[in-house]
Image (cartoon, rainbow, N blue to C red):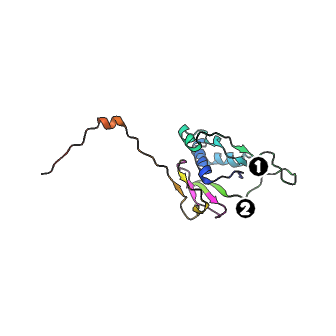
Amino acid sequence: MYVHFDGYPDNKLPLLLAAYQHRFAGDLEAMARHLIDEVHHGWDELGTDLLDGAPAALRRSLTGGDEYPSRQMTDVIWADGTPAERELITQDGTDELEWAYVLHPHGIEVIALQEYDRGPVVAWDTDPRSRIVANPGAWHPDSRAPIVAPRTTPRLSTAASASAPAPRKTTRR
């Protein structure tokens, strides 16, 4: 499905991963129906409504608090005045597009269209807060996706450490 603002992977991939994990609860068919089958022409933009059902902290992390709706393309008229009909986008029709995202059962394939004709697949369970490289050259199809998982620090409970016994010193003779 065509998305006018197709977007770089550091912007769109977290949105799509979070949508799969939360709004669609891992139901790829429901996600594909929403994004592809139930759209008349295409999308102007994919919005934060795809994050419905995501935890508030994740939503804030991905959007910085900004909210904007997905917008479908409406009343599309070609230069010759004829109304547009839904078209299948093929490899030959991607000259002006920079990125493609292909939904697979095991993950989402990210294709840097100006560089490659296929791309690495990012597993659906990838943390949407991961750091994602937007450089098209980094998305070589035979390489791992250029994604770095977010750093997480273990939570230390001050109550547990205060009540824990101090280590005993032992001396050897």
In the shown orientation, is residue 79 left or right of residue 128? right
Name the residue carrying label 1: 41
Taking the view exactly as shown, the residue that stands out farthest to the left is 173
In the shown orientation, is residue 39 left or right of residue 148? right
* Quarter holding residue 75: top right
Name the residue carrying label 2: 95
Q: Nearer the viewer, residue 62 or 15?
A: 62
Task: Indicate which label's residue lies in the foreground, 2 or 1.
Answer: 2
Q: Position of residue 110 (x, y in %)?
A: 61, 57
Q: Amino acid at mark 2?
A: Asp
Assess whether residue 120 is covered by the magenta stretch.
yes
Taking the view exactly as shown, the residue that stands out farthest to the right is 81
Q: Position of residue 50 (x, y in %)?
A: 63, 43
Residue at image location 70% in from the left, 49% down from the top: 36
Q: Nearer the viewer, residue 29 or 145?
A: 145
Residue at image location 64% in from the left, 46% down from the top: 31
The stretch of residues the image draws in magenta is: 110-128
* Quarter holding residue 155: top left
Q: Name the dominant secondary structure of the magenta segment.
A: loop
